[in-house]
Structure formats: C-alpha cells, structure tokens
C-alpha cells in the first residue's frame, strides 16, 4: 500500500517516470550494503527486540511523513528520504523475522509456520491492493501513510507480547541438527560446525567483520545450504522483477488497463494462499519433486505468459504461478531453517538477501530494456531463464542431499 501510494503521488507531482524509478532505486540500494552488517546484528541481539526497534522506527518515520502530507508541507526530498530509510529497515527486517521463526518454532512445525506467514503476507497484500486506490482517492497520500504507519505500531506490539525476557541467539544456541521434518535438510548424523566465538573475540569493528567472515566460511563449508540459498534467491528475483513485465502485459498486450492488472495481481495472491495451504502436504510426500516442479512451472509458464491473449487466461496463469511461488518459498525457507545453526541464521539469510537483491536489480534493468527495445516476449523468455536457474540450483540441492544421506556413517 505504501509503495503504490508513493508511486502514484510522485508520478502525479512530477509526471516523470524517472522520478518514479528513483523510488525503486532508493528502496533497493540498502539491500546491497546493509544485510552483511545487519546479519551480524541479528545473530548478536535478541531478534524480538530488534524487530520491535525496526517496527517502531518505521512507524515514527512513516507517521511523521503522513503528518507532513496532511498539513500540505511534504516535499519530495522528504518523501525520498522516507523511502530510503524504509529500504534500510526492509534490508534487515525479513531476515530478522525468518531467524526469529526458526528460533521459536519446533523443527517439525516449521512448514506450517512458514506457510502461515506466507498466507498472512499474501492476504495482506491482496487486501491492500484492493483498497489502496479507494483510500488514495478519498484520503490522499496522508491517509495511505497513516494506515501504513499504524500497521508498524501493531506489529511492534505483537512482537512485544510474543515472549518475555531478553534472549540473544548465542546464549540459546546449543543444539544439533535433527532431521525430523519432511524437508530438504541435513542427514541426522551431521552436527553443527563449531564456529561460535567468545564475546571478547567478537567485540569492536574487527569483531563485526570477523562475524561476517564466519558466516561466509559457514556457507563455503555447506554447499547444500548455499544451493538452497541460490534457489530461493533466483525465485525471489524472478518474482520481484516480473512486475516490470506484468504491467506491460496488462497494458499493451491485453489492453486491460489498471483494473485488469489488479485482477492479474489478485490471481497471484489467491494462488499464493492456496499454495501455502498445500505446502505441508507437498513437503510430506515429495519435497524435492514438489520444489523442482514448482520452479520448472514458473520457468516454462513465464516463457509462455505473453501468449495469454485473454485476461481470464492471464489471471489463471498468474494464480498458478502464485501456487508455485508459495510451494517453492515455503519448502526452501523451511529447509534453510532446518539446516542452518541458529546462531548463524541472521548472516545466512542476509547473504541470500544480497544475492537476491543483486539478481533483482540486474534482472529488472535487463527485462525493462529488452521489453522496450527488443520485444516483450523475449523479455519473458529471460524471466523464465532466471527461474530456470532456480531449477538448476534445486537439482543440485537434491543431488547433494541424496549423496549425504547415502554416505556411510564413520565407524566410532
């Protein structure tokens, strides 16, 4: 809702698509720089408190901007500053949330927890997409930002009520990996690497960079986890960069306008909710197969997407893509949470966030250029290719996991 409202406001105020693109740049840039340091922070402090602080800060920023908009004193530089600061928060918040889920939820319930989070997010996005135009017309940008800022307050309160006490990850992390849930995870005999350092060793600026190096060393030692991260990064880069093309599909090929675009996005959100509900069943039966089929469907389906010349077909296809994205997202995130030590989860998630952001920026620019200067259908082929990269990474995950399971246990 925030992004849509700000986009419409800037476009109306400047009549410049370049000014609109600056919003995307400002919200994306922190994702290239902040996550490595944010990951260290996530692995050092209580993740619940960190989430509360981020939500509270975002609430102050957004509600302050909403007040300026209501008073008619909002300048573009102030709006751009808000977008940039929110980008900094986004660069840390979701990695914090994923690490907190891993910390609080028993391993056998991770699939249900991740599916619930995905359904809640997609449901909220669907509701926001439905209401944003109505609210903007009647309350303007100030109303949009007021509602958005209030959601951050509610989120902070929910985190505050989640549990009592202060629990830094390094104090509660003292477990072995146990392969008990039906996901793509480590064999039972694999224990966590002994990478934890004392507080004395991890203090100061040198300690921060040592923590970053520790996280990178872990990923180098765990090719299966790294392959899972590439799988997730390819999928998310495809999901986000696809927005560049779906707008053009609705406007130029389907001539469906803003309302048609809304229906296409509603199909995605509905499919994602269905996929979240089905993730548990898919994981219990054939997690590898479900992941690979979901990514392959996204690859082939997006290649064929520009040939959907009727709106209802495009909506149905995007609903299928939503199902596949939900299945892929829940399976990969759950598997990452099941495999990665808790005291390294923040840095691991942040590393994958950087990979995904780099792919997202590159693909968004490439897809936009090809759609404008070559052909929209060629751009969709490239979008299918990024999902194809996810298929290759998922196949590697399966090969490495099966090899580890078949490897004989060393004699004691």
Image: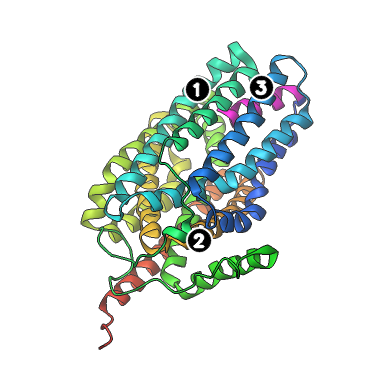
The answer to if 45 sits in the magenta stretch is: no
- 316 up-or-down from 385: above or below: above
What residue did someone put label 3 on? 66
Choose the circle earlier in sequence order: 2 or 3. 3
Q: Is residue 6 magenta?
A: yes
Q: Pointer 2: what residue?
A: 348
Mark closest to the chain's N terminus, 2 or 1: 1
Nearest to the eye among marks 2 and 1: give it: 2
State the image coordinates of residue 251 (x, y, percent, origin top left).
56, 30
User: Disc 1 or 3, which lies upstream in sequence?
Assistant: 3
Provide the major secondary structure of the magenta segment: helix
Q: How is the image coloured?
A: rainbow
Residue beneath label 1, please? Answer: 259
Q: Position of residue 60 (x, y in %)?
A: 64, 30
What residue is at 66 percent from the left and 31 percent from the top? Answer: 61
Q: Is residue 402 visible?
A: yes
Please identify the residue farthest to the top as the structure is shown.
138
Q: Label 2 to label 3, Cα distance in Å?
A: 35 Å
Report helix, strand or loop for mark 1.
helix
Gap between marks 2 and 1, in whole Å? 39 Å
Residue at screen point 24% across, 58% down: 286
Residue 295 horizontal/vertical position (percent): 39, 54
Magenta segment: 1-13
Which residue is depicted at the point 30% across and 52% down? Answer: 106
Label for residue 128?
A: none
Q: Residue 264 location in percent, x, y?
A: 45, 31
SS at mark 3?
Answer: helix
């Amino acid at each position: 809702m925030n992004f849509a409202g700000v986009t419409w406001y800037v476009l109306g105020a400047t009549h410049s698509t370049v000014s609109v693109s600056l919003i995307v740049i400002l919200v994306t840039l922190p994702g290239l720089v902040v996550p490595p340091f944010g990951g260290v922070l996530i692995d050092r402090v209580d993740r619940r408190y960190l989430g509360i602080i981020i939500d509270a800060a975002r609430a102050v920023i957004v509600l302050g901007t909403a007040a300026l908009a209501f008073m008619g004193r909002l300048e573009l530089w102030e709006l751009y500053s808000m977008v940039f600061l929110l980008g900094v928060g986004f660069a840390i918040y979701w990695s914090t949330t994923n690490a907190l889920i891993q910390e609080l939820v028993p391993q056998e319930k991770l699939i249900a927890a991740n599916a619930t989070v995905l359904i809640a997010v997609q449901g909220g996005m669907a509701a926001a997409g439905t209401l944003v135009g109505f609210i903007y017309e009647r309350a303007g940008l100030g109303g949009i930002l007021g509602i958005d800022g209030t959601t951050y307050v509610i989120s902070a309160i929910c985190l505050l009520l989640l549990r009592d006490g202060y629990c830094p990850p390094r104090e509660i992390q003292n477990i072995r990996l146990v392969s008990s849930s039906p996901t793509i995870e480590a064999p039972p005999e694999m224990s966590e690497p002994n990478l934890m350092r004392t507080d004395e060793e991890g203090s100061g600026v040198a300690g921060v960079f040592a923590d970053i190096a520790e996280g990178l060393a872990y990923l180098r030692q765990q090719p299966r986890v790294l392959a899972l991260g590439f799988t997730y990064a390819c999928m998310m880069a495809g999901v986000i960069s696809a927005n560049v093309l779906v707008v053009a599909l609705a406007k130029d090929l389907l001539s469906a306008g803003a309302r048609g675009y809304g229906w296409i996005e509603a199909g995605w959100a509905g499919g994602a909710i269905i996929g979240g509900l089905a993730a548990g069943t898919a994981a219990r039966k054939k997690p590898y197969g479900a992941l690979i089929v979901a990514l392959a469907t996204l690859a082939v389906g997006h290649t064929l997407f520009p040939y959907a010349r009727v709106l209802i077909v495009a909506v149905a296809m995007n609903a299928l893509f939503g199902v596949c994205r939900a299945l892929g997202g829940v399976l990969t995130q759950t598997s990452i949470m099941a495999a990665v030590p808790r005291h390294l989860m923040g840095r691991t998630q942040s590393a994958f966030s950087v990979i995904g952001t780099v792919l997202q920026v590159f693909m968004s620019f490439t897809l936009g250029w090809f759609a404008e200067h070559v052909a929209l259908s060629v751009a969709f082929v490239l979008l299918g290719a990024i999902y194809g990269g996810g298929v290759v990474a998922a196949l590697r995950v399966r090969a490495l996991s099966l090899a580890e399971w078949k490897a004989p246990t060393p004699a004691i």
